[in-house]
Image (cartoon, grey):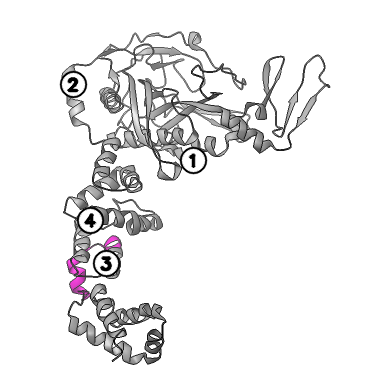
Amino acid sequence: MASVLFRGIQTHPFLLYRSALFTTKKAVPYCRMECTQVQTATQDNPKSQTKISSTNPNKTLNKLMENYEAIIGIETHVQLSTLTKAFCNCPYNYGSQPNTSICPICMGLPGTLPVLNSKIIEFAVKVGLALNCNLSLNSKFDRKQYFYPDLPKGYQISQFDVPIASGGFIDLDLPVEFGGGHRRFGITRVHMEEDAGKLLHAGEGSYSQVDLNRAGVPLLEIVSEPDMRSGIEAAEYAAELQRLVRYLGVSNGNMQEGSLRCDVNVSVRPIGQSEFGTKRTVTMRKKEGLSDYRYFPEPDLPEVILSQEYVDNIRNSLPELPEKKRRRYEKMGLSMQDVLFLANDLNVAAFFDATIGKDADVKLAANWIMGDIAAYMKNERVSVDEIKLTPEELAELISSIKGGTISGKIGKEILFELMSKGGTVKGLIEEKDLVQIVDPVEVEKMVDKVLSENPKQLQQYRGGKTKLQGFFAGQVMKASKGKANPALLNKILLEKLNDKS
């Protein structure tokens, strides 16, 4: 979903062409619909308009895009996978009936006091370390004042001037189909806060209802530097954050559930200019500014003080993260396309690692996972954890094919049965009598029989239609029920076909 969301900036660059969407009225931008001509108007003479037709708008747009670059920064809210909310014991389950996971604390009733869920601190430190940030060993919570129907307290508990982590970066690899390459994007800060509730708007728009189930759910806000220059880079940044929090186990990262939400800030500037341009906006709703929030330290919560020992213990417990995993796979000799596919999903990567841990050929294991296994999972709409094939059996299957016990064709048949029904490779080979025929005498008998039954095709082959070799090989494989060793079969078949005595 992240790729679909942000790649729109790349595939529809006109969205960055301000004059195509906005014009001004006494220096105040206002939205308009025309995108094929430039229109100006003044309050002094509203009927007076200057129209400049564009005979080739695409050419003008392309020229504009050659001279300007996009400046993109992203604020990401990650919902943490804690068992209870940030400051009370209420659980949060996505899709629950409205207002069934609430209590006086998350309802903001008078006289209630928050109690910090310590798991939030642990998860925040994990993310901060994974993003190569500097941790604040002494931080605090702050009250962010604003008024909205889904914020029952009238303020949000957040972090203002002393975030728990800041000054980091994230490394990623762009997909090969988009040019590839390595990118590093800066991370400004990571801070902890609680979520607000949710407004449910009536279909006819006459009223709204408030669901406070989400109120008080713990969030991490991750703010990037404005380092991205295209929709592709923005998409891959968001996708990498999603991978990272899933690898860490701090969030499921499901955008469709609101577990990962991105606010994208986009501007343009001439290529080569180091300063950012002046921000121009169209007011669609009134939102508080920094001074309106009236931040001050949260009086009902103590400071967050981390010991170096606590941080080191969490650092040592971190799993292998996506960037390190990609570099390890790259050193194995895998292509970048293989690397990106395998490291994209934590469970797929674990399956691959367990397979090669049983001495399976690295490239063959990657090919099977990316090919037939991935296709099966897609068709059956299952994850790698839901198929019945185990890494041990995939390694055994690869070994059986490589060692000549079974052919690749039979290997595929066995694979699909292992994925759908389970079992063992050796058990299926014995049960179905699938051992490859490697006896030259037996293979030669089958070749002789096929040639004698097809004299016309044999004559055509010897007359120059050498493509018929595939026909004869297919007939022999059919007669052997796919068990003839392909290399041995082709060797004997060629000798027989070219023997004109």
Sequence-wise first label, 3 or 4: 4
Residue type at mark 3 is Gly
The N terminus lies in quadrant: top left
Label annotation for residue 390:
4
At a point 23% along the width and 85% down the height, the residue shown is 444
Kindly identify which residue carries mark 3. Answer: 411
Comparing 144 with 40, the one in front is 40
Measure the C-alpha gap from mark 3 to mark 1: 36 Å
- Residue 119, quarter of picture: top left
Determine which of the numbered discs, if any, sits on residue 4 in the image.
Answer: 1
Where residue 187 sits in the image (x, y, percent)? 37, 23
Q: How many marks?
A: 4
Span of residues in magenta: 418-435
- Residue 310 — which label? 2
- Nearer to us: label 1 or label 4: 1
Cα separation between marks 1 and 4: 33 Å
Q: Main secondary structure of the magenta part?
A: helix
Q: Is residue 69 left or right of residue 61?
A: left
Type of the residue with mark 2: Tyr
